Image: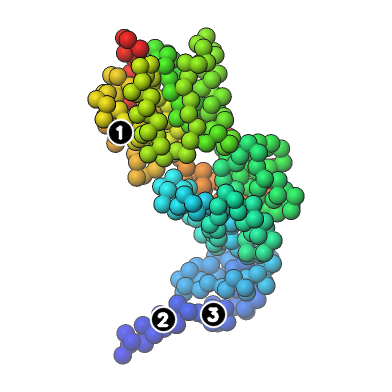
Amino acid sequence: MGEERDGFRWRRKLTMNLKELAAELHLSQTTVSRALNGYPEVSEKTREIVLAAAQRFGYRPSPAARRLATGRAHALGVVFNAERNALMDPLFVEYLAGVAETSAKQGFDILISPSTPRDEIVTFGRLARDGTVDVVILTGPKVADERIALLSELKFPFVVHGRPPDPVGISFIDIDNFGAFQQATSFLIQLGHRRVMLINGEEHFTFAQDRSRGAAVAFAAAGLPSDMLDEHFMPMTAENAYRCARQALESDARPTAILCGSILVALGVLRAAAELGLEVPRDLSIVAHDDEMPAFPADQFHPQLTTTRSSIRAAGTRVAEMALARVAGQKPGAVAEVWPVQLIVRGSTAAAPEKG
């Protein structure tokens, strides 16, 4: 009987409302509501007690009640390309995990909105106007980005993961794509490679342009003609990379080294090389950008991959922190971070073959 009573009490607590939570804590409903919603007049000690009890009893205020009490939705907005099924993309999922972990600690939800390239601008406009989110996290900034222009015009809070085409007055975080690919290309040139292939992201993204410039600057600094850098822009999937690498490696002037825009690209390149009987790194050196995805650890490949390394999950964590700061009133453009990228030399790179 006691167990049933305890079980009943537990079930009741899982559906506890504000009035019941306040009664349990012997506090007024107003105090509990203000503690849950971050009002400054509530002491930190009281806030900690209320938040701990809310978590213990499974209390979650309704979105409508929260909006009514605070004027906020307590949600971050993220848009993804439904045509590519981004929720099956390990890179996007790892990035989203960083965003979610940080937002959850602050009691914020994530509203993930599917869209298509054709409807993307409409989706961002809807998020900015309908009150379902407090801030938008924009990913993959483009060389000409209508999304940034729209959100700026609407004066709706947003932060950017990636370098905006014009970063003035915009809060963003990015990695040093230019420096990373300049360093990786210079490293290959120092190993004696002269025919280098770069499998890059799509040309309209700013990160792809930065990587392209980095590789080109390394060739120019070495006094090498630019046409020895064979560059290809494309969606960075293993299948796209396989087809591109296969064609290049079958040609008479095949590259002796390939720079890969991601680990997924490296998977495709390794498949093409294996099918053609080419040994890495004896016949072909490979450098890949590593976002530190647990599903594809660079040091578990055979051979272990030389990489430019930066954690996509850490980037998701940081961009969520920036988004929450914007909700709290931080001015746009207050944060502009470019993280250095480390070159990790492993077994997939070696001196260029004699005939190369």
Say which element carries label 1: helix
The crowding category of the residue bearing disc 2, from other C-alpha atoms within 10 Å (few below 14, some 14 to 19, many at least 20), is few
Per the model, the C-alpha gap separating discs 1 and 3 is 56 Å
Give the residue pinned by disc 1. Answer: 271
Split into 4 quadrants, where in the image is the C terminus? top left
Percent coordinates x, y for residue 77 in the rendering: 59, 56
Mark 1, residues whose alpha carbon is within 10 Å: few (<14), some, or many (≥20)? Answer: some
In the displayed structure, 213 sits above or below 4; it is above
- Quarter of the image that includes the N terminus: bottom left
Please state which amino acid type lies under the numbered disc 1: Arg
Which one is closest to the eye, mark 1 or mark 3? 1
CB under 8 Å between discs 3 and 2: no
Q: Secondary structure at mark 2?
A: helix
Query: Which residue in the rendered view is the most extreme toward the bottom?
Result: 1
Tag on residue 17? 3
For marks 3 and 2, the one nearer the N-term is 2
Q: Looking at the rendering, which quadrant does residue 144 occupy?
A: top right
Measure the alpha-carbon separation of dots 3 and 2: 12 Å
Give the labeled residue for mark 2. 11
Residue 352 drawn at (x, y percent): 35, 14
Residue at 53% x, 52% y: name it.
Answer: 80
Residue ID at (71%, 45%): 149
Depth check, mark 2 against mark 1: the one in front is 1
Q: CA distance from mark 2 to mark 1?
A: 53 Å
Q: Amino acid at mark 2?
A: Arg
Q: Residue at x 70, y 49 (%)?
A: 150
